[in-house]
Amino acid sequence: MNGVAIYLEGGGAGKESRAELRRGMDAFLGEIKAAALARPLRWKLVACGGRQRTYEAFVNAAGDPDFSIRVLLVDAEEPVATTRREHLRRRDRWSFPGVAETAVHLMTQTMETWIVADPDALSDFYGKNFHKSALPKAQNLEMVLKQDVANSLERATRDTTKGVYHKIRHVNALLSGIDATKVRARCPCCEALFIELPGMIEVA
């Protein structure tokens, strides 16, 4: 059986922390996963930890007969002014011979950009003393710098009983709870993922 494999940056060095990220992203990508399983195609989401390790896992998977659809999903880290592959070639010195643009995707500029795109979900998770007004108000969140997103999350969550946003402890619940439709409306690179990957699945 053919399949879809997504190689995802993040989750840290620990096995359990990577599993937490994988579970959260699996829920967030539920619409795409459902499309794959309906074909039916196998579905694999690999949280790889570090950035370079993620790229290497993606490259090393080339030719895997069980997963003809392979996707790289990493942070952009900074504003994107070119194609996705060209951005990563310039910034990280990565090469993608024979890899289509549709197989390379970015969380622009960072995964937390997707998280702050749904303030209501964050408010539901953090509860009392969550400061929604501290979050970025830009419609296109990909124009907000990575550090500004991080600072806004810290201000919004620092007085809550769950404490300041923590990338490992909170990521599963947050990714599982945010509305992908809201994220797609404010993050063009997320919209591209939700359009292009189902397109690849449809013709697999």
Image (cartoon, rainbow, N blue to C red):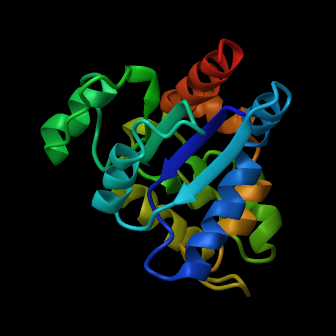
Asked if residue 177 lies left or right of residue 190, the reply is right
Asked if 11 appears above or below 137 in the picture, the reply is: below
Residue placed most toward the observer, 184 or 154: 184
Q: Which residue lies furthest to the top in this view?
A: 203
Q: Residue at x 28, y 29 (%)?
A: 85
Across and down, in percent, residue 152 comes to 49, 62
Q: Which of the 4 image quarters holds residue 33? A: top right
Res 119 seen here: no
Q: Residue at x 53, y 66 (%)?
A: 153
Looking at the image, residue 148 lies above or below residue 198: below
Residue 68 position in % (x across, y down): 55, 30
* Left or right of residue 155: residue 180: right
Q: Is residue 127 left or right of residue 47?
A: right
For residue 166, above or below residue 58: below
Count of numbered marks: 0
Q: Position of residue 174 (x, y in %)?
A: 70, 62
The quarter in which the N terminus is drawn is top right
Residue in the foreground of this view, choosing between 130 and 95: 95
